[in-house]
Image (spheres, rainbow, N blue to C red):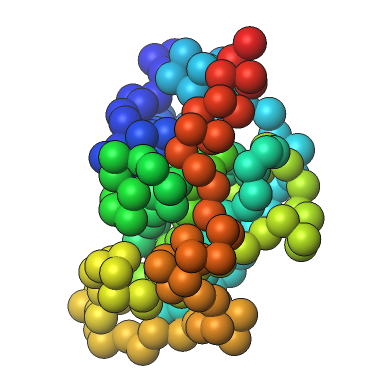
Amino acid sequence: MTGPSIVPMAIEGAWTVTPRQFADDRGAFLESFRGDLLAPYVGHRPDVVQTNVSISAAGVIRGVHFADVPPGQAKYVTCVSGAVLDVVVDIRVGSPTFGRSDTVLLDDVNRQAVYISEGLGHAFMSLADGSAVTYLCSTSYAPGREHGINPLDPELGIDWPDTDRTGRPITVTLSDKDRAAPSLAEAARTGLLPAYEDVRSYHRSLAS
């Protein structure tokens, strides 16, 4: 069986994974996650400690979320039903691409996934009612080291869609926590963000 196509995103430490699908009159089959094939790109075999599932109405934005490094939280994200615009944000102070983001459509057609390394920010917008997203996480949830940045912060410049995947208008919906999250500049000023060199050092320790 031919493996997935794994392609670096514009943000260092993130990759898109496009699986090969095998379809017939019964339906379809695919390998949604192959840690052994990701390992050469990531630098180590990804460890899955916790699996999360979120279900979101059209227009819901979740994120931008990140965790303290170390240990951070790497994520392997895919949309098993519906569609979402997935966003990776470089929040590593000192990174050449600090403050930049990259996006990819995750849906139940192409069934792409995104691998997001520790130290990066992650968000998505649901583009269909009932969009179901799964996250394979390298660490378990720890509220004391989980943080967020307001996804509507103009400095991030994320071009959030105003229509769903069928072209119907949608209204942005945020949790109270995400709406109250600081801007990128505020998070940097208060020392909330990880340092680029610290993140790179941690990744080297995982590879060794």
Residue 8, quarter of picture: top left
Pinpoint residue 48: horizontal percent, then vertical percent: 70, 34
Q: Which percent across, then down, holds residue 7?
A: 31, 29
Q: Is residue 12 left or right of residue 119?
A: left
Q: Is residue 78 visible?
A: no
The structure residue drawn at horizontal position 67% and vertical position 59%, both measured from the top left corner, is: 146
Res. 183 image quadrant: bottom left
Identify whether 21 is placed above or below 174. above
Q: Is residue 51 left or right of residue 128?
A: right
Q: Is residue 141 above or below residue 1?
A: below
Q: Quadrant of the C terminus?
A: top right
Q: Is residue 52 visible?
A: yes
112 is higher (above) or lower (below) than 175: above
> Residue 38: x and y, percent?
49, 22
Q: Residue at x 33, y 25 (%)?
A: 5
Residue at (35% x, 61% y) in the render: 85
From this viewpoint, which residue is outermost toward the top?
208
Q: Please state, as top left, top right, bottom left or bottom right, where the N terminus lies in the image.
A: top left
Q: Left or right: where does residue 119 sit relative to residue 95?
A: right
124 up-or-down from 4: above or below: below
